[in-house]
Amino acid sequence: MISLVVLISGSGSNLRALLEATNRDDFPAKIVAVGADNDARGFEHARAFGIPTFVMAPGDFSTRDEWGGALLEQVRAAGADLVVCAGFMRILPAGFVQGLTPNLINMHPALLPLFPGAHAVRDALAAGATETGATVHVVDEGVDTGPVIRQVSLAIDPGETEAQLHERIKVLERALIVDTVSDIAHNLIDLKELARS
Ligand code: GRF
């Protein structure tokens, strides 16, 4: 059984999927804390499952590095084996990444390396892509540049809006993150090896 800290910024539907998975007897991970950079709406899911939450807002620190150091201390204190960024909309300071790598993963609503950044769904539509998807990757010091762990793709429907497409991607993301965490916990995915690649 591995211990997860999940970091969120918004609605936390991927967090919810992980919380529901941890209720299954055969799921090999538990969530020990949920953190956010603001008083995120998604905390309601953590509270519903009795999981402790914490807010670590960059604006409360004089530098990004200080913020990263405090965040690192917090996830270590919670006893995380793996940190999952599930809609955490902040670029993580290098010290935080170095302190956790390769046990720090992120989900992204596109087929990386295509469409990195905060507007992946909008960018895929603007580029006229006919296909996009979701990626789980190891976090490195770049923006959505770390080694890909798993991806799933889907066809973009003609005339689909950004909101409609993002919602369809998120359905895939929820299954992807649950399966990926399970496979990491079962040692079916070797994050160290991936991070070396
Ligand atoms: C997901 O699409 C994730 O990939 C992106 O932000 C969204 C978070 O959704 N980085 P939710 O907060 O889990 O509902």
Image: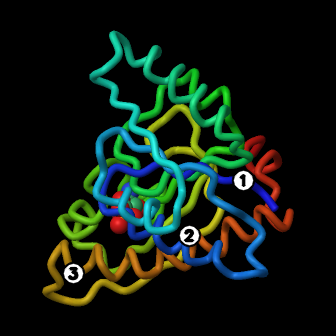
What whole-number distance in Å separates the C-alpha atoms at marks 2 and 1?
12 Å
Q: To which residue does mark 3 refer?
A: 164
In this picture, is 195 found above or below 134?
above
Q: Is residue 46 left or right of residue 78?
A: left
Amino acid type for the residue under numbered disc 2: Leu
Asked whether mark 2 and ligand 1 are closer than 8 Å, the reply comes as: no
Q: Position of residue 91 (x, y in %)?
A: 40, 35
In screen coordinates, is 13 left or right of 163? right
Q: Quadrant of residue 103?
A: top right
Q: Is residue 96 above or below residue 160?
A: above
The answer to whether residue 109 is seen in the rendering is no
x 63%, y 52%: residue: 32
Mark number displayed over residue 3: 1
Image quarter where the C terminus lies is top right
Q: Residue 153, how many percent across, how many down?
A: 47, 79
Q: Which residue is mark 2?
A: 18
